[in-house]
Image (spheres, rainbow, N blue to C red):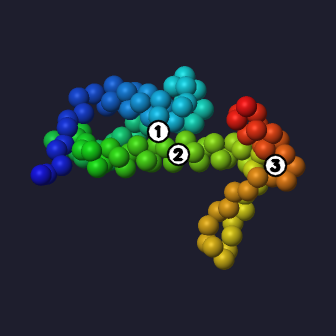
Amino acid sequence: MKDKYIKIQSINKFTKHMAKDLCRTMEIDYKNLKEYISFHQAKNLVKQYARKHKDELYINEKRFAKLAEEFHDWVLGIDLCKMCSSGELDCYWDDDENKMVFKSNEKTSGILKFKEERKRD
């Protein structure tokens, strides 16, 4: 069966509903979303993953899954940057692995461990 495309009636409404749903799954308050991504940026992601036909936008399940993953990765990237800039994490480029590595900062690892223990209680 061919993956069915649905027409995006209003890109603004679609973007808002998508962002709200993804915030719920990521346990982020929608009101705080602007700390991670602007509405304009989210709307551009929708345009990037939607298919344009006769000046109208369409999306299918496969493209929506890719869009949701990109949105999720964007938010996680911002969180990682915030943690690095606040000193909670150290980050560096590993030439051998050819990737960015994130590690808990030795100064804050005790604090992070304490936070984790408090969550379990």
| The furthest residue to the right | 107
Q: What label sits on residue 41 in the rendered view?
A: 1
- Asked which quadrant contains residue 75, the reply is top right
Cβ atoms at labels 1 and 2 below 8 Å apart: yes
Q: Amino acid at mark 2?
A: Trp
- Please name which of the two marks, 1 or 2, marks the residue nearer to the observer: 2
Tell me what residue is drawn at x 27 percent, y 45 percent.
61
- Please name which of the two marks, 2 or 3, marks the residue nearer to the observer: 3
Query: Which is nearer the eye, 121 or 83?
Result: 121
Q: What label sits on residue 74 in the rendered view?
A: 2
Task: Say left or right for 9 vs 96.
Answer: left
Q: What label sits on residue 109 in the rendered view?
A: 3
> What is the spatial separation of the Cα atoms under label 3 and label 1, in whole angstroms?
34 Å
- Asked which quadrant contains residue 86, the reply is top right
Q: Position of residue 6 (x, y in %)?
A: 20, 38
Q: Amino acid at mark 1?
A: Gln
Task: Say left or right for 74 vs 106.
Answer: left
